[in-house]
């Protein structure tokens, strides 16, 4: 296996609610306007990131992992396909109110994973908010009626957001990212979304975007809002601090606050995705070094071994 740190070129998406901040603040190079999403670490059929360096430069990450499945790690290979998708989202406008199915429903109906996800708020404008669940318990017929008569927003739970906030969103949770927010999203490797409300918007051809009411009724959890994330303790070590942000059956996510040189290791159990959210850093192995600027994402194959991360930066680390 060609085990080396790989810089990734993302896949871009131009959904109508997107903006320009991924280009102006996260160094994404594309003429696409608007730029709504940047799929940073993806092996999905709707877009795979591309390896930008080394002997596999130009190969998609999906093709690399098909050739070298052990790069996902022993835990990664326990999944029927590569387990996660990591993306950046720039919500210049409100996203649709939506829900994702769990594995059982998605595999039976859509032929892919369900979608449990988490959000890390990278940037937000004053007063920004998002939708997370219902304010009060809902029954199926009332939910259907509120969708039909455009009163759903009266029943949802709106949450003010601030930079650095973390939200864990299990499959089945009604949710929506509000305008003025840039988010890092770690999720199951799925692109299945059921919209239930879209603010009356139309697509480029003047047609209302499709809603998926019956499927949403099948999968949405109707109980009142409950907190979806718990705070884990910060772990101090030489070179900075590491905080566990999420630990679930689908992914594990950590935030690295780098202030010097930190020694790390990628063992045979899991790959590591590494995203530079702020600042700059250098990743060093015994033989080579790679610079990470704000907005860069790297894929470190399982079994890579020891590496050092040096600089002043905030990084997000993800694996299984």
Image: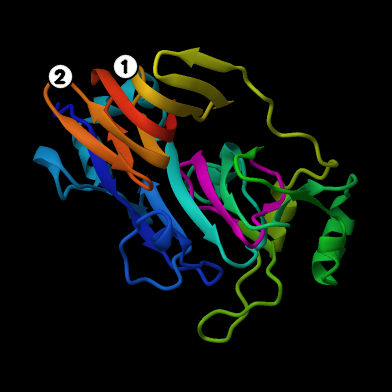
In the rendered view, does 99 fall on the left or right side of 78? right
Q: Give me the residue at 61% from left, 71% from top.
A: 210
- Under circle 2, the secondary element is loop
Bounds of the magenta segment: 170-193
- Give the CA distance from mark 1 to mark 2: 12 Å
Q: Is residue 196 magenta?
A: no
Q: Which residue is labeled 1 in the image?
A: 265
Between 226 and 250, the one nearer to me in the picture = 226
Q: 10 Å neighbourhood of mark 1: few (<14), some, or many (≥20)?
A: some
In the rendered view, does 254 fall on the left or right side of 221? left
- How far across and how far down the image is residue 98, in percent? 66, 56
The quadrant in which the N terminus is found is top left
- How far across and how far down the image is residue 25, in percent? 43, 56
Q: Which mark is residue 286?
A: 2
Residue 66 visible here: no
- How far across and how far down the image is residue 147, in percent? 80, 65
The first of marks 1 and 2 along the sequence is 1
Between 117 and 20, the one nearer to me in the picture = 20
């Amino acid at each position: 296996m060609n085990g080396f740190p790989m810089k990734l070129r993302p896949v871009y998406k131009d959904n109508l609610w997107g903006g320009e901040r991924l280009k102006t603040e996260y160094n994404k190079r594309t003429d696409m306007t608007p730029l709504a999403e940047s799929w940073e670490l993806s092996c999905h059929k709707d877009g795979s990131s591309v390896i930008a360096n080394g002997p596999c430069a130009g190969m998609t990450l999906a093709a690399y992992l098909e050739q070298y499945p052990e790069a996902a790690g022993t835990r990664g290979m326990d999944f029927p396909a590569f387990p996660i998708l990591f993306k950046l989202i720039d919500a210049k406008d409100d996203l649709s109110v939506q829900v994702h199915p769990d594995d059982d429903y998605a595999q039976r109906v859509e032929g892919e994973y369900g979608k449990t996800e988490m959000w890390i708020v990278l940037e937000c404008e004053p007063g920004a908010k998002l939708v997370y669940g219902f304010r009060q318990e809902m029954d199926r017929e009332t939910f259907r009626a509120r969708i039909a008569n455009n009163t759903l927003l009266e029943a949802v739970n709106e949450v003010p957001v601030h930079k650095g906030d973390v939200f864990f969103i299990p499959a089945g949770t009604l949710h929506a990212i509000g305008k003025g927010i840039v988010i890092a999203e770690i999720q199951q490797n799925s692109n299945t979304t059921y919209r239930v409300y879209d603010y009356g918007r139309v697509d480029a051809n003047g047609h209302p975007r499709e809603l998926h009411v019956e499927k949403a009724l099948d999968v949405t959890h109707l109980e009142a809002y409950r907190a979806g994330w718990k705070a884990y303790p910060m772990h101090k070590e030489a070179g900075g601090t590491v905080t566990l942000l999420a630990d679930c059956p689908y992914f594990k996510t950590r935030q690295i606050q780098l202030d010097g040189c930190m020694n790390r290791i990628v063992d045979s159990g899991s790959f590591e995705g590494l995203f530079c959210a702020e600042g700059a850093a250098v990743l060093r192995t015994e033989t080579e070094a790679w610079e990470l600027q704000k907005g860069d994402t790297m894929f470190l194959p399982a079994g890579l071994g020891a590496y050092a991360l040096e600089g002043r930066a905030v990084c997000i680390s993800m694996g299984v």
